[in-house]
Image: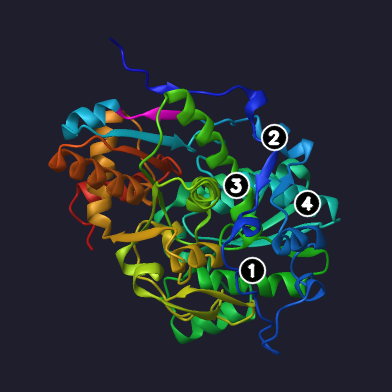
Amino acid sequence: MTIPTRFTLSQADIPTHWYNIMADLPQPLPPPLHPGTKQPIKLEEMTAIFPENLVMQEMSTERWVEIPGPVREIYALWRPSPLLRAVRLEKALQTPAHIYYKYEGNSPAGSHKPNTAVAQAYYNKQAGTKRLATETGAGQWGSSLAMACKLFGIECRVYMVKVSFTQKPYRKLLMQTWGASVFPSPSDQTEFGRKMLKSDPKCPGSLGIAISEAIEDTVKHPGTKYSLGSVLNHVCMHQTVIGQEAIKQMELAGEEPDVVIGCVGGGSNFAGLAFPFVRRKIVDNKKARIVAVEPSVCASLTKGELRYDFGDTAMMTPLLWMYTLGHDFIPPEIHAGGLRYHGMAPLVSHLFKLGLIEAVSYGQTKAFEAAMLFAQNEGVVPAPEAAHAIRAAIDEAIKAREEGKKRVILFNFSGHGLLDLPSYDAYLSGKLKD
């Protein structure tokens, strides 16, 4: 008997609303604070860098937020994304576990990031924004926003963390193909970038530095707004199309996940899969464990401190209540550039504090071992970020084998690694270290 391995939905099943977990939190999330007054920040104070319609989403406690028609139309280029069962990986592991993965690598940019990039470009277009400035780590966010801006006729300017700018040249070229201007960060384009280069000409950069540059660019250029690819509430909310689809697809598979897994840097892809499942824990008393997977050298949940901190190095953002390693922390030059962030999304941090989710961390060699095993059995090459989730899924499957118990595992495959092959070259040649 052939085991079903692919569970697909129709275009009519693309979610009509985003899910806002703020409505169901057992305890309220501490608000962002104004960096000067240390008082809860007001809507009008946020509109210096964001359009008002997105600030309203950021502060909303409405449970379901309708997805605009033009956004759903673009989502239909790749959504609903498939849910697959990794039966060959199960066989290789000799495990009784059933391993499922939600594959977000089929978007035009190759990752989950367009789910929010398209939404943010749409709302900025509605607000009259002419130009967007942003940062990017591995380039998945930058390329997604570049695509979305081109579709809506907005200029796009991207500050790409320098180590990833060097490691991942094809993501830079992808952004440029979609019309974006891309600069290695720290750059000579901003006052803060020049300051960082003066103090350390070989600075590898960080997401915190790139965010500072993008915000400085925003406030100095009329008609420009800032766009962020992770961390903030509205960004996490836009990603919940992933988990909503996955719940329907698991029903098609006839199974209920025992454990739900996603990698975390800022928190967006994890939130996208996990938040609809967290809602079922809160509202329906479901028992699934929900696990966030970090890189061990940048593990804000497992090694950081829960407190108010800045989202950027230059201390220009509002103060966010989050697990943080410190806004001036510059992570080592790991290949999972999308996970090199000093802090965690406030909503993810809050759920971790409340015990609704768990967290683990891995070194990059362990993650790449898992990525190789997955690629050689399932055929799909994972991005280094997604490899962290795969590592945790494999370890859960091994535990199931050792315990002799069936376990249903679901993880988010946040993006493919076809533009990350230099990372695999480093691994295969023995140059990739922890």
Front residue (pair 26, 12): 26
* Residue with the mark numbered 4: 123
Residue positioned 49% across, 60% down in the render: 137
Residue positioned 47% across, 52% down in the render: 270
Amino acid on which the number 1 mark rests in the picture = Ala
Residue positioned 23% across, 38% down in the render: 373
| Residue at far top of view | 1
Numbered disc in front, either 4 or 3: 4
Q: Are marks 2 and 4 in contact (CB under 8 Å)?
A: no
- Binning the other alpha carbons within 10 Å of mark 4 as few (below 14), some (14 to 19) or many (20 upward) gives some
Query: Magenta segment, which residues?
Result: 82-86
Amino acid on which the number 4 mark rests in the picture = Tyr
Circle 3 sits in a helix, a strand or a loop, which is it? helix
Q: Quadrant of residue 360?
A: bottom left
Left or right placement of residue 130 versus residue 143 in this view: right
Point out the tag, 1 or 2, that comes first from the N-terminus.
2
Judge whether 290 appears above or below 61 on screen: above
Q: Position of residue 129 (x, y in %)?
A: 82, 57
| Residue at far left of view | 402
Front residue (pair 175, 391): 391
* Residue with the mark numbered 3: 144
Q: Main secondary structure of the magenta part?
A: strand
Q: Position of residue 20 (x, y in %)?
A: 65, 53
Disc sitting over residue 214 in the figure: 1
